[in-house]
Image (cartoon, rainbow, N blue to C red):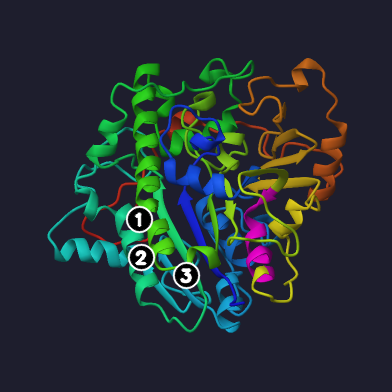
Amino acid sequence: MPRPNFLLISTDQQRWDTLHAAGNEYIFTPNLDWLADLGTRFTRGYSDCPICMAARSTILTGNHGFTQNLVENVHEPDPIDPRSSLPGLLSQAGYQTRLIGKTHWPKRGCAYGFEHLETLDEYYKEMQRLGKCPSAHGLGQNQMEPGISTVDEVDSLTHWCVDRSVNFLRNRDQTRPFFLWCSFTKPHPPLDPCRSYWELYQGQPVPEAQYGDWSREAEDVPPYYRELTFCLNNIDRYAPHQQAQIRRAYYACVTQIDYNLGLLFSELRESGELDNTWIIFTSDHGEMLGDHHLGAKAVPFEASCRIPFLMKAPAPWNQPFPIEAGGLCHELVCLADLLPTFCGLAGLEPKPCDGISLLDSLQGRGRQELHVQCRDYHAVLCEGKKLLYAEACGTQLMFDVESDPYETRELLRAGEDASSLREKMMQRLGVSELAACRPEDPNLAGLRNRWPGHHSPDVPSDVRH
């Protein structure tokens, strides 16, 4: 039997709840629903460091960001060894390895073990040659206001990622199995879907933002958790009807990715490779999208750190155990699990890392607890509960994310015992108490709109979306 192919599909900043197959009746995701119907949906998938560069480094290394001191969009020193990275290991094992789309990792242009990259720079240079500008609307890369793409569907970056992926499948080395990472940039802001997808949601309802007994008003939210919202976007300033338009644009970006994936899945089937290819779909992190008056990511609330996680096996798959189509797995899984999963399926000796193979999780041998850290925001999940802790101000929040996934009921104020979760967090951090490192709150007014992410439309960049 030939060695299996691997297709990893990642989006950028996609929330866990933006799949129709996961119960969202407001969104169109037919191709991801197909993937869920034929594969497994992991209902508790997480980004263990919900920010772009750290999350992508976790995928490459199989290690949590905090075990490598990678908890921001800054990497010093560079922790990624191309010889032991996921693509490096697969390349050495004879796989043809390629990434198409967004990289956004420590050294721009570095392949980190991939045989070949097709990056955003190539797309933007191609648009320049054609005299087209995908972002002439002027919206920055972190702004939440809705917009419309200034290029047609066939010239969009989303379509380009799929078009180049299809080209790779048609022209690849047929004598070797492949590992293809199709890395989308959306639905990361700017929220500028092509017009047809914006119009698809015209007149359609979208979910309202979620607020809790601890976040009814923006001022109720602990100030330190609002820091990135003030730095990157203004979503807390907008009225409910305006936030509905923001969600409409966000949903349209997700649907644009989904519809384009239909072309990629069709190519796999028509080339005869579908039944010999493992497909995993996920995202680097989520997006608060106005929940609790917050925007962007980094904070360890569910909307920010919980992500979609789908896996489809080749058909049929019965070794070492059968995987049923349309199954659900409720184990805690995270981005660190991708490396041991792909390496194990390739028949490689497992590399010591923080990740656990998704096949082990499918057999009930997953992790019992998961720690999340981004900057000095922390969270620990165990037995359906989650404790959050911000070092800078000492604030602690606790939720039952199994019964209350939108974190509307804060449990500490209700007298819930958090001693077990606190002990787990203190053990991980190596401290005897969860104290404030910096008792004062940030000057939010001084942070407003510090970096909405302006980028010249004529300068290629690997952080444009």
- According to the picture, the residue beneath numbered tag 2 turns out to be 166
Mark yes or no: residue 375 visible.
no
Task: Give the amino acid at mark 2.
Answer: Val
- According to the picture, the residue beneath numbered tag 3 turns out to be 107
4 lies above or below 250: below
Task: Give the amino acid at mark 3.
Answer: Lys
- According to the picture, the residue beneath numbered tag 1 turns out to be 263
Residue placed most toward the observer, 300 or 193: 193
| Stretch in magenta | 333-344
Which image quadrant for residue 85? bottom right
The N terminus lies in quadrant: bottom right
Whether label 1 touches label 2, CB < 8 Å: yes
Which secondary structure dominates the residues rendered in magenta? helix
N-terminal label among 1 and 3: 3
Which image quadrant for residue 198? top left
User: Residue drawn 54% across and 24% down?
Assistant: 292
Count neighbours of disc 3 (C-alpha within 10 A) and say few if under 14, some if 14 to 19, many if 20 or more.
few
N-terminal label among 1 and 2: 2
388 lies above or below 184: above
